[in-house]
Amino acid sequence: MKKTKIIMGMPITVEVLDSIKATEMESVFEYFRKIDRKFSTYKKNSEISRINRGLSKDQWSEETKEVFNLSEQTKLQTGGYFNIENKGIIDPSGLVKGWSIHNASKILLELGYSNFYIEAGGDIEIHGYRNKRLPWDVGIRNPFNVNEIIKVLRLTNRGVATSGSYIRGEHIYNPIKNRTANDVASLTVIATNIYDADRFATAAYAMGQEGINFIEGLKGMEGYMVSYDKLATYTSGFKELIAN
């Protein structure tokens, strides 16, 4: 079963190859709706909007406390390049998307499903196999022509996230140099789960062309960077993931 719904301002697709009940599939989408109600900066009554208006910490939900703690941890792990606060406004979306996809995957795993993927806004977590024990194929888009796939990866039990300006414009902030990150067209990170792939892709993109070296130094992760002069740079183990 495969379904796509617009939630959190983006298309979210869930495909489960095992036989699945419609109610269980819907529970995944309902989880994303709950996260949107809590963390959307566009909804004035969301918890994150109320925090930006001064909601006291003793009124924060446990999920929000978790996201803030994980954000602080990521900030330390990235030397400050991942920062959910910009000019006094808190926006944890750079972590929440990958975190929520990963948590939604856990819902399906706990229900006993093993062959599926969840994709939201171009970021994806895949589990198991697509058919006959073949891994899933995941494409990396050309940042200069989004209708073109420039690399196809063959993966299972991985997360893939891409940060760039080619769809949403310059929206990732470099907190160290106090400007938007703008010298890299796209940077893709492959990790064991989408939570790690997404948060570290965001930080690495903010680092500019040094970001690919940062990913090279992270255990269990690979990366693929495309610069604005249309040159690709990738980590040492990336080629092993490319479909033949």
Image (cartoon, rainbow, N blue to C red):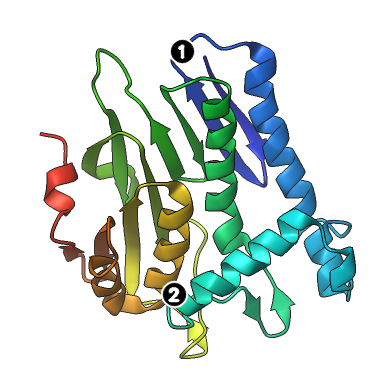
Which residue, given by chain and number where applicable, does mark 1 sit on? 18
- Where residue 10 appears, as percent x and y from the top left, is 60, 44
Q: Earlier in the sequence, mark 2 or mark 1?
A: 1
Residue at disc 1, secondary structure:
loop
Tell me the kind of residue under disc 1. Answer: Asp
Q: Please state which of the two labelled residues, at mark 2 or mark 1, is closer to the viewer.
A: 2
Relative to the observer, which residue lies in front, 242 or 197?
Answer: 197
Q: How many C-alpha atoms fall within 10 Å of the one at disc 2: few (<14), some, or many (≥20)? A: few
Q: Residue at x 47, y 89 (%)?
A: 176
Tell me the kind of residue under disc 2. Answer: Gln
Which residue, given by chain and number where applicable, does mark 2 sit on? 77
Q: Residue at x 28, y 32 (%)?
A: 137
In which image quadrant can residue 115 be found? top left
Q: Residue at x 25, y 12 (%)?
A: 132
**Disc 2 and disc 1 in contact, CB within 8 angstroms:** no
Q: Is residue 48 above or below residue 121?
A: below
